[in-house]
Amino acid sequence: GEIYANLLKDKDTNLIPTFAHWNASELGPDTRLVPGKPVQSAYSFAAISSEPARIIAELIYRNTFINVAGEKKIMPMDIIVTAVECDTLPDQPEKFECKVVEP
């Protein structure tokens, strides 16, 4: 998977990410998605049989990092922004059909 975020660096501990914006010394890496600018990434998986395969990719907005939610004892909120389902055969990975599905 990929993480897209504007990360803050803590000025006392140099830890990234920090949510203590009042104690942030600088911005860490900014990997947020830019509207209208496509981003591509590639993944591969081993097929366990010759049966058709279904791949589901979701773009999820999460309001906090999982480890921070655990420390603060809050429940992270996940919102599925968009999702795509693709069907393919393991012996023909270049031939697959995808469709956008409702989140």
Image: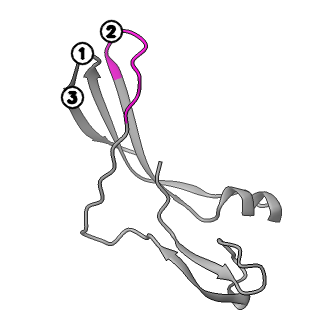
Disc ID at residue 96: 3
Residue 45, relative to residue 31: is it above or below? above
* Residue at (24, 35) in percent of width and height: 98
Disc ID at residue 50: 2
Label 1 belongs to which residue? 91
Query: Mark 3 or mark 1, which has the lower sequence index?
Result: 1
Q: Which of the two residues, 50 or 74, is positioned nearer the viewer here?
A: 50
Q: Which of the two residues, 79 or 69, is positioned nearer the viewer here?
A: 69
Q: Is residue 51 magenta?
A: yes
* Amino acid at circle 2: Ser
Residue 78, relative to residue 90: is it above or below? below
Q: Which residues are magenta?
A: 44-53
Do tag 3 and tag 2 residues touch (Cβ < 8 Å)?
no
Spot occupied by residue 48 in the image (x, y as percentages of width and height): 43, 13
Query: Mark 3 or mark 2, which has the lower sequence index?
Result: 2
Q: Residues within 10 Å of mark 2 (few under 14, many from 20)?
A: few
* Amino acid at circle 3: Phe
Horizontal placement of 32 versus 15: left or right? left
Residue 69, relative to residue 5: is it above or below? above
Q: Residues within 10 Å of mark 1 (few under 14, many from 20)?
A: few
Residue 36 figure quarter: bottom left
Do tag 2 and tag 1 residues touch (Cβ < 8 Å)?
yes
Q: Residues within 10 Å of mark 3 (few under 14, many from 20)?
A: some
Spot occupied by residue 70 in the image (x, y as percentages of width and height): 78, 57
Horizontal placement of 27 versus 88: left or right? right
Do tag 3 and tag 1 residues touch (Cβ < 8 Å)?
no
Label 3 sits on a secondary structure element that is: strand
Q: CA distance from mark 3 to mark 1?
A: 11 Å
* Amino acid at circle 1: Asp
Mark 3 vs mark 1: give the one in front: 1
